[in-house]
Amino acid sequence: MATNIGMMDSAYFIGRNEILGWINDRLHLNLSRIEEVASGAVQCQMLDMTFPGVVPMHKVNFAAKNEYEMIQNYKVMQEVFTKLKITKPLEVNRLVKGRPLDNLEFLQWLKRFCDSINGGIMNENYNPVERRSRGGKEKSVKGTSKVSKSLQTNNTHQPPPPVTTSSKPTGPKQARSLATGGGSNSSAEVQALSKELEDVKVSVDLLEKERDFYFSKLRDIEILCQTPELDDLPIVVAVKKILYATDANESALEEAQECLIESLGLEAEEEEGNEEEEEEEEDGAEEAKTQT
């Protein structure tokens, strides 16, 4: 099992939209934000999809909204990790906070792990809606009005609750007043927001392409540095220091330069020493000839 996945692995360069689309397609959900998976329920079902029958879905609470409810889902996940001998640590305290980056990184790792098990091929016999409705707790938990609708999509087939109407009569005058009061600038605002959204999408696409381009370059450099014949070269050692630096706040360039200069200095000293030894040997040979 590919449980140890380095930060330079391509798994960590999958975009937010791509991974949400993958989850929505596999689990028949309608997620739109990474924060919606903070409860851990989605991750539990990803494992259930990959290892059918291993996850006790009746213990998974898809309606969890408080941290103590989410922690119960992560306890279920940890039990599954232990059962499958997965050594990946679960940083529950960070995941339940709903921070997008933390949850995105964990989803990227989990998707990569699931793909390594089934080769990225979806199990056609797996019914995610049925597994949630029969196994999960989303139907039995009260007070779920604030739960994200995306996690409840396709989960239940109950009719929608009745819509409460105002006791005040509505009529043409009221409709005209509402339209006049709130709709005068609505079309212009919608157009402006739509234009802004399109610009953001274009920017995101360009950034993702640029990211993929530079990642491919870094990956080629990494593969080259892993060549056994080049592994001990000073320049390769310096490049690896930059590639595998773990501190995001400090640049590893200065350390790599020092390492390279030190290595080159030692090599120069060794070459000078070898030359001196050769000269001494030659002098000794000449003296021996003169004595004879």
Image (cartoon, rainbow, N blue to C red):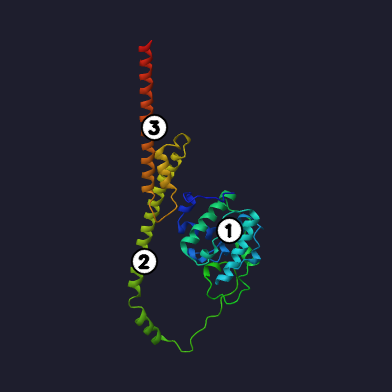
> x%, y% of residue 45?
59, 61
Residue ID for mark 3: 270
Q: Secondary structure at mark 3?
A: helix
Residue 84 versus residue 256 in the image, above or below:
below
Residue 277 versus residue 175 in the image, above or below:
above
Residue ID for mark 2: 194
Report the amino acid beneath label 1: Met
Q: Nearer the viewer, mark 3 or mark 1?
A: 3
Q: Tell me the CA gap for discs 3 and 1.
A: 57 Å
Tell me the quadrant of the picture where the C terminus can be found.
Answer: top left
Q: Can the viewer see residue 150?
A: yes
Report the amino acid beneath label 3: Glu
Q: Which residue is nearer to you in this view: 102 or 182?
A: 102
Report the amino acid beneath label 2: Ser
Residue that appears at 57% across and 68% down: 70
Q: Tell me the CA gap for discs 2 and 3.
A: 67 Å
Residue that appears at 52% across and 75% down: 146
Q: Which mark is residue 57?
A: none
Q: Secondary structure at mark 2?
A: helix
Q: Which residue is nearer to you in this view: 43 or 96?
A: 96
Q: Residues within 10 Å of mark 1 (few under 14, many from 20)?
A: many
Of callouts 2 and 3, the N-terminal one: 2
Q: Secondary structure at mark 1?
A: helix
Q: Can the viewer see residue 63?
A: no
| Cβ–Cβ under 8 Å for marks 3 and 1 | no
Q: Residues within 10 Å of mark 2 (few under 14, many from 20)?
A: few
Most extreme residue toward the front is 291
Residue ID for mark 1: 46
Q: Tell me the CA gap for discs 1 and 2.
A: 34 Å
Q: Which residue is nearer to you in this view: 48 or 134?
A: 48
Give left or right: position of 40 versus 258.
right
